[in-house]
Image (spheres, rainbow, N blue to C red):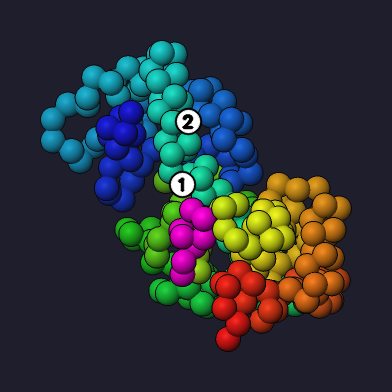
């Protein structure tokens, strides 16, 4: 299965757009359902583009996929689901926390300074620059993404490293995927999960909430990252605040939760 996915996503500057249906707004099963309904002409066009600069014929397995054969599409979906289970699902909490924290920063920029503030905020990413109505990013090849009055969807991505991603087909709704910068030690924290001593002390959900607060987050961000009802996320935050492990501060119309020094000490088991 890994070999099949590698053929579709080689180490290069292009992989087919049909592998990323939607605009970052779908769960796994919805995305896979959309993939299964990809039009045949699009499968054929994008797989041909993938192999336009490679030596030799298109592999037989990809030819059947390009033909839109149902069994080939089902094999692809099975491979993607298996890969997700191994490489994504164990780390979803960390990913959602980073994405939620990024959305908080971007939303605050919009509330404070409008669209200009949102785009200027990307200057913090290496190689990014916003000047005179244009956002320049370190894309792997030279290209210009013209909006032509369309809405640009900005998607934070955990596994997007340094360079952004965009759909190649300019007739598709414009999407710009930008990299997140997970805090050092995220992998070890993800692996420890509910077995960590702090989880035994305050509960797995509240321990994970504390871990996520490397950046301030709203209650709605926390709820989305942990897949909790907002009322449940608010209750967890209240318990942690009353214990002195987090601090809640109002900024405009938003309330942001910060981890305190004591909260960090509880997580790390060391009071500095």
Separation of marks 2 and 1 at Cα, in angstroms: 22 Å
Q: Identify the residue shown where x is 46% and y is 46%.
A: 167
Which of these two is toward me, 252 or 137? 252
Give residue 79's mark.
Answer: none
- Region of the chain picked out in magenta, as a range: 184-192
Left or right, 59 with respect to 252, comes to left
* Mark 2, secondary structure of its residue: helix
* Mark 1, secondary structure of its residue: loop
Q: Identify the residue shown where x is 79% and y is 56%.
A: 233
Q: Across the whole image, how many numbered discs are drawn on residues?
A: 2
Left or right, 243 with respect to 164, comes to right
Magenta stretch: dominant secondary structure: helix
Sequence-earlier tag: 2 or 1? 2
Examine the rendering and report whether any part of residue 253 can be seen: yes
Query: Residue 12 location in percent, x, y?
Result: 27, 49
Tell me, yes or no, whether the highlighted magenta stretch contains residue 185: yes
Q: Identify the residue shown where x is 50% and y is 69%.
A: 183
Examine the rendering and report whether any part of residue 19 can be seen: no
Left or right, 150 with respect to 143, comes to right
Query: Residue 33 location in percent, x, y?
Result: 57, 26
Residue 264 lies in quadrant: bottom right
Give residue 81's mark.
Answer: 2
Q: Is residue 272 above or below residue 113?
A: below
Query: Residue 241 location in percent, x, y?
Result: 81, 71
Q: Can you name the residue that lies furthest to the bottom here?
A: 272
Q: Identify the residue shown where x is 57% and y is 35%.
A: 28
Q: Residues within 10 Å of mark 1 (few under 14, many from 20)?
A: some
Tell me, yes or no, whether the highlighted magenta stretch contains residue 268: no
Q: Is residue 198 above or below residue 89?
A: below
Instruction: Report which residue position mark 1 lands on.
Output: 167
Which of these two is toward me, 83 or 120? 83
Which of these two is toward me, 221 or 65? 221
């Amino acid at each position: 299965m890994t070999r099949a996915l590698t053929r579709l996503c080689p180490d290069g500057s292009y992989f087919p757009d049909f592998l990323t249906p939607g605009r970052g707004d779908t769960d796994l099963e919805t995305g896979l359902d959309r993939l299964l309904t990809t039009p045949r002409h699009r499968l054929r066009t994008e797989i041909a583009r993938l192999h336009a600069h490679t030596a030799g014929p298109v592999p037989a397995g990809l030819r059947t996929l390009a033909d839109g054969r149902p069994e080939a599409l089902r094999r692809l979906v099975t491979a993607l689901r298996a890969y997700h289970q191994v490489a994504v699902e164990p780390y979803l909490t960390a990913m959602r926390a980073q994405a939620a924290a990024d959305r908080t920063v971007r939303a605050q920029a919009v509330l404070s300074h409008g669209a200009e503030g949102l785009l200027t905020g990307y200057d913090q990413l290496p190689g990014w620059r916003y000047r005179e109505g244009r956002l320049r990013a370190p894309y792997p090849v030279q290209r210009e993404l013209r909006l032509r009055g369309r809405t640009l969807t900005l998607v934070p991505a955990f596994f997007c490293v340094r360079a952004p991603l965009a759909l190649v087909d300019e007739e598709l709704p414009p999407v710009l995927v930008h990299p997140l910068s997970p805090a050092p030690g995220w992998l070890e924290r993800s692996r420890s999960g509910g077995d960590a001593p702090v989880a035994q002390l305050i509960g797995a959900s509240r321990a994970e909430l504390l871990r996520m607060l490397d950046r301030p987050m709203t209650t709605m961000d926390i709820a989305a990252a942990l897949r909790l009802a907002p009322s449940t996320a608010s209750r967890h935050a209240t318990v942690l605040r009353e214990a002195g492990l987090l601090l809640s501060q109002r900024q405009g119309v938003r309330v942001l939760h910060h981890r305190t020094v004591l909260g960090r000490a509880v997580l790390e088991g060391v009071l500095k």
